[in-house]
Image (tube, rainbow, N blue to C red):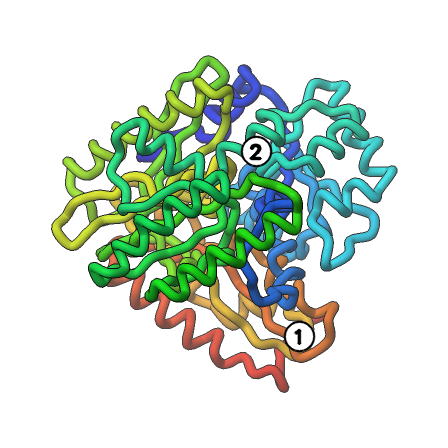
Amino acid sequence: MTGPGFNRRLKTAVAGDDRAALVFLGNFEVEEQWARGEIGLPRLSSAGSTAVVNRMDEFALLLGGADDHVVLKTAPDREYLHYLGELGLRLPTVHVVADQLPGNTVTQDALADPGLLAVLERLGEQGALLLPHGVSELEEDLAAKAGIGIAGPSAALCKTVNSKVYSRRIADELGLRQPRGWACGTPAELDEAVAGATALLDEGAVLLFKEALGVSGKGISVIESARRLERTRQIVAKAARAAGTDRIAFVIEERVAKVADLNYQFTIARDGSVHLDFVKEAITANGVHLGHRFPPALDAGQLAELGRAAELLGSRLAADGFHGVVGVDAMTDPDGGLYPVIEINARNNMSTYQVRLQEQLLGPGRTALARHYPLALAEPLPFGAVRELLDGLLLRGPGGTGLVVNNFATVNAGAAAGTPFNGRLYGLVMGDSPAEVAALDAAITERLGRIEPSATPTRP
């Protein structure tokens, strides 16, 4: 699905010029900003993983070309940069914040750095545009203080179109198949939805009660009884009364049988044209994204149906003023049917950051698995040590077989909190067949499993 030149096509879409210079900003989990002030569900704290999530900013390094720029929380490992260069990847100019705090997003660190703001101002004067992972009020504040334009819609519009309430309502409007459910924008709509949902529970259904702006499996409650449903309704209603608002944003829908999770991406240009970039199988567990397999095991009819859904959704989003990258979660059912829109993510997605590697290194007719490998470490692990440990398993060039590391910063992000700590090594495993990729993945897992927290290998 992915044609050559995604970087140029993206520039045409968001800036109207395929030679425009973009400044990429990996402000992952921007939903946390969009959700500020919204009524939510009780949830456990995920503070322990914040430092690692914030270092996902390094994914943006592989989205830009040599004529682009990227803002990062810390400078990439030099041996990692050398490795990327050996693969023939030309990288954007890197700008590093002066004093990164692990609990801050890259946007927050950039806002606190007058020197970086001055650099962004100069880039803006030269015509460069800021392209965040997603636009919230923080990114608008950064752009305003730096005097640089944003290559995307307003934060308010981005928040609106990323809501699960918006997804459900426009899918209904467009006649796209969805699990049975309701979009709730007020307590009165929630009361009505609960009445209908109770009937589904009586039929034996299991329900998902979702915050409109939840991300990475957060903000979802599994409902299996009318008592729990009513209790959840009361929690939301009480929170709304306490906040003095009659505005809420939740979706209640049936949990349906599925065979595979899917993710497809399209890009909407400023003129409203829509381009389908790719379709991939998404690997998830309990609503949490773990990776992708591609190409997906779909037939021509299923791919065509997703293409039609992309055109319908893209045109509808464009009519509301949105342009840029849009990722859509979808599913296949046990009968081979599709649920072509489970939710819309009108921002960059994990799969967005794989496109350039897919274009330049994978090649047509081949298979890839994008995933992360958990690590338990006693001290920071340099890339050179990883390269030695995975000798013979790393990709050596375009069209080859092996692992391509596409984010190394997340390996050591947790070190600031003390030792031992947990890290993640992100990468794409490339091969000629699913069987070959699976064997490589197993070999990589085994090698990395040799690392013990009490004996982490180090190099100067």
Left-right relation of 205 to 105: left
What type is the residue that disc 1 sits on?
Thr
Horizontal and vertical percent position of residue 12: 50, 19
Horizontal and vertical percent position of residue 282: 35, 52
| Residue drawn at 73 percent across, 59 percent down | 102
| Residue drawn at 72 percent across, 50 percent down | 73
Which residue is at the front of the view, 292 or 365? 292
Q: Distance between the residues labelled 2 and 1?
A: 31 Å
Query: The C terminus appears in which quarter of the rendering?
Result: bottom right
Query: The N terminus appears in which quarter of the rendering?
Result: top left
Residue occupied by mark 1? 458
| Residue drawn at 61 percent across, 76 percent down | 377
Left-right relation of 246 to 105: left
Q: Is residue 78 above or below residue 9?
A: below
Which residue is outermost to the top?
A: 271
Left-right relation of 258 to 34: left
Secondary structure, mark 2, is: loop
Q: Residue 65 carries which label?
A: 2
Which residue is at the front of the view, 268 or 38? 38
Q: Which mark is residue 42?
A: none
Using the rendered view, name the quadrant where residue 165 is placed.
top left
Horizontal and vertical percent position of residue 229: 40, 60
